[in-house]
Image: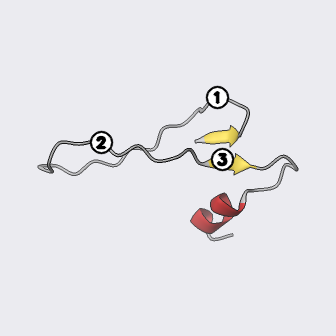
Amino acid sequence: MHGRAHLRAKVLLLEAVKGAEPGLLWEPPLVVYGPDGAYTQEARDICQL
């Protein structure tokens, strides 16, 4: 999870299921703020803003 696209990620979101098959799915990064300082559309959709 990146605060802004040009910054390093500060948070890692992880979901695990006990007893599940082995494997890892790597999703594209979530960028919270756009260049204008407002929430990105993806962040607003996730947080239902």
Q: Quadrant of the C terminus?
A: bottom right
Q: Residue at x 62, y 71 (%)?
A: 48
Q: Earlier in the sequence, mark 2 or mark 3?
A: 2
Q: Residues within 10 Å of mark 2 (few under 14, many from 20)?
A: few
**Label 1: which secondary element:** loop
Foreground mark, 2 or 1, reads 2
Q: Residue at x 82, y 55 (%)?
A: 38
The kind of residue tagged 3 is Val
Q: Earlier in the sequence, mark 3 or mark 1?
A: 1
**Label 2: which secondary element:** loop
Q: Residues within 10 Å of mark 1 (few under 14, many from 20)?
A: few
Q: Nearer the viewer, residue 41 or 13?
A: 41
Image coloring type: secondary structure
* Residue placed furthest toward the right: 36
Q: Residue at x 84, y 49 (%)?
A: 37
Give the CA distance from mark 2 to mark 1: 21 Å
Q: Quadrant of the N terminus?
A: top right
Q: Which residue is mark 1?
A: 8
Q: Residue at x 52, y 46 (%)?
A: 28
Q: Nearer the viewer, residue 28 or 31?
A: 28
Quarter where residue 23 is shown? top left
- In percent of width and height, residue 43 lies at 65, 58
Q: Nearer the viewer, residue 31 or 49?
A: 31
Mark 2 vs 3: CB contact within 8 A: no
Q: Does residue 21 appear left or right of residue 43 in this picture?
A: left
Q: Nearer the viewer, residue 1 or 6?
A: 6
Q: Which residue is mark 3?
A: 31
Q: Which residue is mark 2?
A: 24
Q: Does residue 1 appear left or right of residue 18 in this picture?
A: right
- In percent of width and height, residue 42 lies at 64, 60
